[in-house]
Image: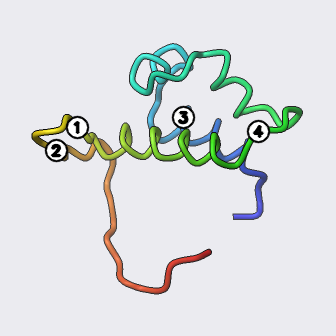
Amino acid sequence: MDEPEYVQCRRWREEVLELSRAQLAALTGFSADVIKDYERGDKKIDEKARKRYRLAVAAVTFGLEFDWDEVRFRPVVPITISAGRMRK
């Protein structure tokens, strides 16, 4: 997509997950204010922090529940699994 990442973040939360910031915060452990920062283009966010946020949102999207003994997978959106080259 050609949209900036912060636009994609908000659209994903609103249109795909259909969650408020507060709801996503409860599921990811990121505060609603931090989520707001990710969804605005005016804050510089460290790349490692951005990756942690992406992984947390992916876990919510795929319905992943993790503890050190077990991982459960319950997708909440349709997913496509494909093999191919990973982007760097």
- Label 2 sits on a secondary structure element that is strand
Residue under label 1, please give it: 66
The mark nearer the N terminus, 1 or 3, is 3
Q: Position of residue 51 (x, y in %)?
A: 58, 48
Q: Are marks 2 and 3 in contact (CB under 8 Å)?
A: no
* Secondary structure category for the residue under label 1: strand
Distance Cα–Cα, label 2 vs label 4:
29 Å
Quadrant of residue 12 within the rendered picture: top right
Q: How crowded is mark 3: few (under 14 residues within 10 Å), some or many (20 or more)?
A: some
- Mark 2 and mark 4 lie on one chain; the one further toward the N terminus is 4
Name the residue carrying label 4. 45
In the picture shown, does residue 48 fall above or below 32?
below
Disc 2 from disc 3: Cα separation: 23 Å
Residue at 72%, 50% in the rendered image: 5
Q: Which amino acid type is shown beneath numbered disc 3?
A: Arg
Q: Earlier in the sequence, mark 1 or mark 4?
A: 4
Residue drawn at 47 percent across, 40 percent down: 57
Q: Given contact means CB atoms under 8 Å apart, are the residues at marks 2 and 1 in contact?
A: yes
Element type where label 4 sits in the image? loop
Q: Alpha-carbon distance for marks 3 and 4?
A: 18 Å
Residue for badge 3? 13
Question: What residue sits right under mark 2 in the picture?
Answer: 71
Q: In this view, does 24 lie above or below 58?
A: above
Residue type, label 4 = Ile
Is label 1 or label 3 in front? 1
